[in-house]
Image (cartoon, grey):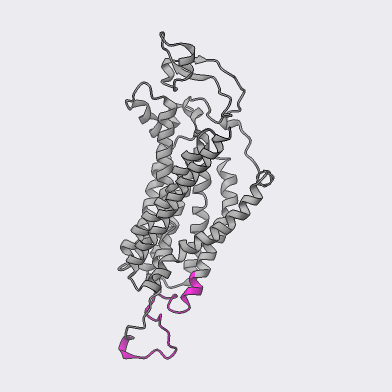
Amino acid sequence: MTLSVVPIGARLLRRLPRPRRIGQLAVHRLYIFIVTYLLLVVSYIIRRPLGVSKNALSQNCSHLVPPGGRHMLDNNTEWCSWKPFDHDSSTKFAWLDFTYRLSYSIAMFLAGYIAERMDQRLFLSSALMFSGSWLIFSGIAYFADIHSYVYFVIGQVGAGVSQSTAWPSVVTLMGNWFGEKGRGLVFGFWCTSSSVGNILGIFIAAAFVNFAWGYSFVIPGLIACAAAIFAYFFIIVDPESIGIPDVNLNPDVELNEVVPIDANASTANLCESAELELSEEIIVEKKVIHHEPVHDRKPITIWGAILIPGVVEYSICLFFCKAVYYAFFFWLPVYIKANLEVGNEMAADISAAFDGGTAHCTVKHSHDRQTYSWSDK
């Protein structure tokens, strides 16, 4: 890769001072972990606005007096809500949720297929830009006084399709940088980004839901657009693109190991050292394997992925887990407000505790799984 197309982030890392015993690979892994973590946090922030805003779009108006002192003949208690959610709002919200999840799940197949066949930096930045744009599209309904249900449906379809693209991309990036050994715990901490993003998304959307729910969509949308620009300039796709050997190796077989020159060190000590500056390195030959470069690997097909042992069974289990999770994801603030009789913002803030528990269990499960897995080897 020529210097002209190397991201700014890679150039900055080369210039930053660091201890000599900390290798280039370790530095770049930490960098990729932080960058992808932040980007994934943003990708979950932008999923929260509708769930938080439901309480503002549909209000219980039974304690209010209709304009002009008129009486509602149809006993409609939602007459003060944002049209078209001023009647039968639960059904309409349910169809919006269904529309979002359906478009998300269908687009996920295509997103994963495309993610493996194009530049990850461009793909992820485009995904975040489109995600933010569609969120702003939905928020415009407040400022433009739009009351068309079709408009909201279109917004959910666009949001579902665009938001499905972030996850396959960041997972591919993490896979490029982290080998199999120790990946479980690393990914356990990394996956807490979803809970952190959900919590921040709740707080951001809740901050505006009481006085101008349109900002609950627009502000996260602008954050996503800013994250898209950040991703384009700071994502490093894989180690090989900046001259670091590929890390996707068998955990029991090491590739030629890059270590610093030290005239007083033994070969055994050199082999235990971390990778350092490319200008001060020697090659210590251990078990050499011929590993196909990242750029030359043939992407797996959808049918090929289905034939991987355990994929179908795992997918079925995940379907039911996600069904329960998204019931809380979309409806917990509504349920809390209805049963605790609290305000819109307070209901949203309380619902964040659910994601706090999710983050804790994600790390705990990953740690236990890795400990159990490696204790058997």
Relative image position of residue 181 (x, y in whole percent): 53, 33
Identify which residue, 329 or 9, lies in the foreground: 329
Q: Residue at x 43, y 73 (%)?
A: 147
In the image, residue 131 sits, relative to residue 113, either above or below, namely below
Quick check: can you spot residue 52?
yes
Identify which residue, 195 or 365, lies in the foreground: 365
Quick check: can you spot residue 43?
no
74 relative position to 67: left or right: right
The residue sitting at the top extreme is 263
Identify which residue, 98 or 189, lies in the foreground: 189
352 relative position to 96: left or right: left
Relative image position of residue 184 (x, y in whole percent): 51, 39
Q: Residue at x 38, y 58 (%)?
A: 353
In the image, residue 146 sits, relative to residue 126, either above or below, namely below
Identify which residue, 143 or 58, lies in the foreground: 58
Total marks drawn? 0
Q: Which region shows up in magenta?
A: 67-93
In the image, residue 215 lies in the stretch drawn in magenta: no
In the image, residue 114 sits, relative to residue 182, either above or below, namely below
Q: Residue at x 33, y 71 (%)?
A: 342
Relative image position of residue 153 (x, y in whole percent): 50, 66
In the image, residue 88 lies in the stretch drawn in magenta: yes
Q: Give the quarter of the image for residue 67.
A: bottom left
